[in-house]
Amino acid sequence: MRLRLVLPATFLITLSILSPVVIAARAPAQNSSGAKPFDLIGWNGGQIVYGVDYYPEAEGPVDKDAGMMQAAGINFVRMAEFAWAKMEPTEGHYDFAWLDGALKVLNAHGIKAVLGTPSASPPAWLMAKYPDIAAMDENGVRYRYGSRRNYCMNNPHFLAAVRGIVTAMAEHYKNHPGVIGWQIDNELGGPDCYDSLCLAAFQKWCRTKYGSLDAVNKAWGTVFWGHTYSAWPQIPLPWNTLYGVHNPSLELDYHRYFSDASRDFLVMQADILRRIAPGKAITHNEMGLFDNIDYSHLNTALDFVAWDNYPMIDFSSHATYENYEGAGLAHDLMRGSRSQQNFMVMEQEGGLPGWNTFWGHQAPPELYRVWAYQAIAHGADGVCYFRWRTSRYGTEQYWQGVLDQDSYPNARYGIVKQMGGELTRLKQILQGTRPVSQVALLVSPDARWAFHIQTLVKGFDYNEQLHRYYGSLRRQGLNVDVVFPQSDLSAYKIVIAPSLFVLTPELAQKLAAFAAGGGTLVLTYRSGVKDEHNVFTDETLPGPLARLAGIAIHDYDPQTSQDQEIVMNGRHYPAKVWFDILTPGTAETLATYDKEYYAGSAAVTRNQLDKGNVYYVGTEPDAPEFYDSLLAGILRGAGITPGPPLPEGVEMATREGDARKVIFLLNYTASNQAVPVGEAYHDALSGAVTAEPVELPPYAVRVLVK
Ligand code: GAL
């Protein structure tokens, strides 16, 4: 858990997946009325935002850098998110002269800026004066100065200092035309802090949510082991206990509390910025599949979503270059976390990732351009590479920027420049367009947290399940929207809702209404098991979904040592992780188990309603072909035509708007590929009319329009 203090985005995702310990937070689904429209392209003077993360406090000379940036088509920088000590060298004395100077030069080269509020890295003088700003681990030990994200977000001295620097930045830059927005903090999401302030904050959160201790005791089932609370101060944080076990209901609420507290911290800063410097957009750099925070809740406080995309870190389960679907899923989740509003990538991998202690993969330079186009294809209206130049100092000396320390215009710079030139040609085509999908993948933050609390079975990975269904849809050439429990489902023909382990009555009802209205719903194993308090249902599984799915589950097998197989249409597929043994009621059996005492029992079912259909997949088939075959049938049934056949390593994604459709074909491989799109298109990058099939040389990007 300590690592969460310091490590970058994608690494954190992995840790949170692997760690059964406390991950953190958010509260009940709220009805969002949909995101405010925000035209990112218009926002940046009508251009697609194309930038680099830049650190003039440590590098330069700025005039040479700005010249090279401009030559590469760069029109945007993000700066200052770790420069608190430089902007406030001593308490209450602010110095923006160095930043003003950099902005002046950058602006003169047509480059605008988002400034980061620097709360992720409190200065040494502040933490020396108020040592209790440092977060406390679960053993009651405060972290020592160093690293970053090392603060307690409930500490009044810290909050006062944050308000001070944010106010000073807002005042200083409120009328600056070259500063177009703010990024609040940097990758919120940790650490968990176990000091008395955070304890009191959690107790207060519980009090606000439940009103009375009776309600808490009832919701959490504290009768178990006699954990009944008779005064608010008795409520603990989920910290070190003997055997490391906690009440799962308390833990789920802790996750919600932590997510809410992170949002409150962000809102405190956003309020200052909006009050003093209205008219500048507010965002935060998020982390895709990272789940300490319910982004769908956090993001209602932003003007637009931004996130940090590092596809070449191989320890993140699905983000290597062989598996571009991982980055695609993260893009779509980020877009879905603000009601499908277009977003930007605030940190797009621009070179080899490496820290003191780990490395990612080096990519062929061309691939950095393909990744950046993938972001755009999935709804990004801006891409900003991390970082302009590899740092000479500190922990990230091996985390390559576009340039290396010697500033030589290397191959990556050449690629970035190529794309910079291309984007000016695309802005008209892309303006007003966004990905559109008839299929949605539903992510439940509550279910994800609950699985972290009780890891249940070896090999279970909520995100892996998302990936399996998502990957199959993308292989069939379809866009996918990621939605959340509070999302409006009416635009979709198919909703895939994996492992709804924790289920509120509202969501159960919404899904029932969706299917009754003619939608196709796909449910998977371990659904309907717990109520919203993480308490087991006393109904026959899948609990509130049993009637809808037309099945009962009287027995299950949590991954015994043998391999399991299922048989569907005469074909065998390996299956793993979990086996719900289904007893069909009104449902028909589509696949059966092939082994163990329950061989021949139903593994996959379909319940046909008057209008809609509900599928239940009781296990995790371990073969892409299974998903392709099941989903091909489901798509046919729902009247959705898949895209053209795609060779492995080629992705298709589309954006639509103003009666215009833009097709992106992305070749992630080092080989020539071809895609039969069916008709001739205009290739917006080359200006040529395409032949059939469309040829894709290694690492090619095609942007096709009529
Ligand atoms: C991100 C972080 C950046 C930088 C980058 C590479 O997670 O926001 O500041 O650290 O990772 O490590």
Image (cartoon, rainbow, N blue to C red):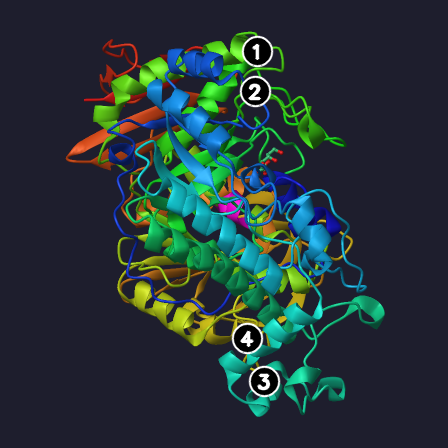
Q: Give me the residue at 41% from left, 36% from top.
A: 114
Queried on whether the Cβ of the residue with tag 3 lies below 8 angstroms from ligand 1, the answer reads no
Q: Give me the residue at 30% from left, 22% from top.
A: 677
Q: Which residue is mark 3?
A: 216
Q: Which residue is mark 4?
A: 205
Type of residue at label 4? Trp
For marks 3 and 1, the one nearer the N-term is 3
Residue 650 can be seen, yes or no: no
For marks 1 and 4, the one nearer the N-term is 4
- The mark closer to the camera, 2 or 3, is 2
- The part of the image, by quadrant, that contains residue 199 is bottom right
Q: Which residue is mark 1?
A: 407
For marks 2 and 4, the one nearer the N-term is 4
> On residue 117, which mark appears?
none
For marks 2 and 3, give the CA distance: 52 Å
For marks 1 and 2, give the CA distance: 7 Å
Seen from the viewer's position, the closer of residues 182 and 165 is 165
Q: Which residue is mark 2?
A: 389
Q: Is residue 93 above or below residue 105?
A: below
Q: Is residue 156 above or below residue 164?
A: below
For marks 4 and 3, give the CA distance: 11 Å
Q: Is residue 695 above or below residue 396?
A: above
Queried on whether the Cβ of the residue with tag 1 lies below 8 angstroms from ligand 1, the answer reads no
Q: Give me the residue at 63% from left, 32% from top.
A: 313
Magenta stretch: helix, strand or loop mostly? helix
Q: Is residue 88 magenta?
A: no
Could you say whether the residue bearing mark 3 is in a helix, strand or loop? helix
Mark 2: few/some/many CA within 10 Å (<14, 14-19, 20+): many
Mark 3: few/some/many CA within 10 Å (<14, 14-19, 20+): many
Type of residue at label 3? Val
